[in-house]
Amino acid sequence: MPIASHTLISKWEPLPAPACKLAESPRFCDSQWFWVDIDGQQLFRCTTADLHAVTEKMIESIQLPDQIGCVLPGEDKNQFTLFGRQGVYQLTWTVNQTLIKAIHLSPFDTTTHRFNDGRADLKGRAWISTLSDVRQPNAALYLIDRSQIRKQYEPLIVGNGLAFSPNYQFMYLADTRQKKIWRFELNLELGTLSHQELFADYCHEHTARPDGATVTANGDYLVAI
């Protein structure tokens, strides 16, 4: 049985930002917001932390070389890791420079799959899920640790909703098409998962599909449905 209880958050406000073909991967870091337009192959940056005070002049963008599904900020506020269809990239984005360097090729068939949703853990490793373009259960969750890419969980159709509990004891993972969210125990030192539990199940709700997610400071898992 699922172990989650639900509270609906229904108040939403659109940002005065350019329209995206497929907006994903919102991130907040160093008092700035970032997000990608996957199909438009753009990365956006909002230069204020106060989303109620955003104007169009505060939003910058750069063109990307791939369908980037996920962006993760680095230790340096000007560096980012990008996860796309063809592989993984290192981005340096400053006022005077935009440099994108490919660092990993994708470990899957890029004609049918791409990286979709991920997070970095406290050890600096990237946990990143993939999706199947043809919506078959042959996508997976990967762990990228320096030069190594290791498959951690399968099968998935559209991996999503990845987040960690505040103490990094648990990792959450959703599948948008399977309509499920799971919780795993995380061994942070070893980078391994165990004791998978069904956290939430939307199979009997016709339109509900779990998408991106985050965890609050007090441990609440917030997921877009």
Image (spheres, rainbow, N blue to C red):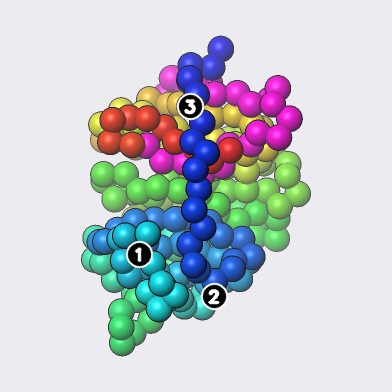
Residue 65, label in figure: 2
Q: Which residue is mark 3?
A: 7
* Residues rendered magenta in the picture: 193-215
Q: CA distance from mark 3 to mark 1?
A: 28 Å
Inter-mark Cα distance, 3 to 2: 39 Å
**Residue 40 at x, y = what percent?**
61, 71
State which mark lies toward you, 1 or 2.
1
Q: Quadrant of residue 85?
A: bottom right
Total marks in image: 3
Q: Secondary structure at mark 1?
A: helix
Which residue, given by chain and number where applicable, does mark 1 sit on?
53
Residue 172 x %, y % = 44, 33
Marks 3, 1: nearer the viewer = 1
**Residue occupying the far top of the picture:** 1
Camera-nearest residue between 69 and 224: 224
The amino acid on which the numbered mark 2 sits, given as a three-letter code, is Pro
Badge 3 marks a residue whose secondary structure is loop
